[in-house]
Image (cartoon, grey):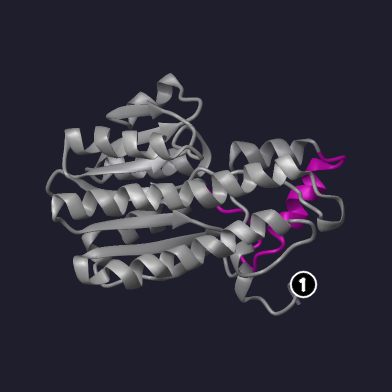
């Protein structure tokens, strides 16, 4: 692969760290956009932009840094937050934070990527990290699911609007992934082991996904091997969203 740069938002930990590591291994020049970067990011990121993904200027800065290193060829919108938002008892600020990061943050990132591809006159690929919450619902996740459904719609819009210009856009929709955030959430439960078993049981595979398994699909969608895949949302959930019932039998 000729030298190309890629921006990964939320690259400091979890799925974002795994994506950055995989793309670095595959030969991409990785630029991370992270609100709270750490020194370990330097192992896989050629440069790191400190900024909030809800801020449009942070995305523009990341695009500029990436293009200064090599032509921008890819963009991964990964930074996101999960919060419970029961509609009968909404916290206005909490809802706004979810929409700004998971919704507007993805629009700003896609805008920066598309603008850079067009300015360069080169093809490029975008991968948006969505969720199975974009296609199915769980109790009290209204704002989160609102944004993740929007991620899939945004992905299709880019594919249709810019496909003739050589720009592809796809999404991945993970289920439960063993990230530091999820492990902390499980540890806070009265019975962490039972909570993990219950969550793992949602998938016919009977286990949680590893971040590297999501990263592998992202890498394919960005690569030249995925050159005719666009406008899709690929579930990486061990069959969870395909299951008819909630029980293995």
Q: Position of residue 173 (x, y in %)?
A: 53, 61
Tell which residue pokes out farthest to the bottom in this image: 244
Left or right placement of residue 15 versus residue 248 in this view? left
Q: How many marks?
A: 1
Give 57 or 122, whichever is nearer the viewer.
Answer: 57
Helix or strand or loop: what does disc 1 sit on? loop
Residue drawn at 71 percent across, 42 percent down: 94
Give 118 or 65, whichever is nearer the viewer.
Answer: 118
Dot 1 crowding, Cα within 10 Å, few <14, some 14–19, many 20+ = few
Give 168 or 17, whichever is nearer the viewer.
Answer: 168
Residue 192 sits inside the magenta stretch: yes
Q: Position of residue 28 (x, y in %)?
A: 24, 43
Q: Position of residue 182 (x, y in %)?
A: 66, 42
Q: Which range is magenta?
A: 189-210
Question: In which image quadrant can residue 207 be found?
Answer: bottom right
Instruction: Look at the picture and state if 57 lies above or below 121.
Output: above
Q: Pointer 1: what residue?
A: 247
Residue 111 sits inside the magenta stretch: no
Q: Is residue 233 visible?
A: yes
């Amino acid at each position: 692969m000729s030298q190309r740069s890629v921006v990964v938002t939320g690259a400091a930990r979890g799925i974002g760290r795994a994506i950055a590591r995989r793309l670095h291994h595959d030969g991409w020049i990785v630029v991370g956009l992270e609100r709270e970067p750490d020194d370990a990011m330097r192992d896989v990121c050629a440069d790191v932009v400190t900024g909030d993904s809800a801020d449009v200027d942070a995305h523009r800065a990341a695009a500029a840094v990436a293009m200064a290193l090599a032509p921008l060829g890819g963009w991964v919108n990964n930074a996101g937050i999960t919060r419970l938002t029961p509609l009968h008892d909404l916290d206005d600020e909490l809802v706004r934070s979810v929409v700004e990061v998971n919704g507007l943050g993805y629009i700003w990132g896609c805008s920066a990527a598309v603008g850079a591809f067009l300015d360069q006159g080169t093809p490029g690929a975008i991968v948006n990290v969505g969720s199975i919450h974009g296609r199915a619902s769980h109790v009290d996740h209204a704002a989160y699911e609102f944004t993740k459904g929007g991620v899939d719609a945004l992905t299709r819009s880019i594919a249709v609007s810019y496909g003739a210009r050589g720009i592809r856009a796809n999404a991945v929709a993970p289920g439960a992934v063993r990230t530091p955030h999820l492990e902390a959430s499980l540890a806070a439960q009265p019975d962490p082991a039972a909570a993990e078993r219950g969550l793992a049981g949602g998938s016919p595979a009977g286990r949680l996904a590893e971040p590297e398994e999501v990263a592998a699909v992202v890498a394919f969608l960005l690569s030249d091997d995925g050159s005719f895949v666009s406008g899709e949302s690929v579930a990486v959930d061990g069959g969870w969203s395909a299951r008819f019932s909630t029980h293995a039998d």
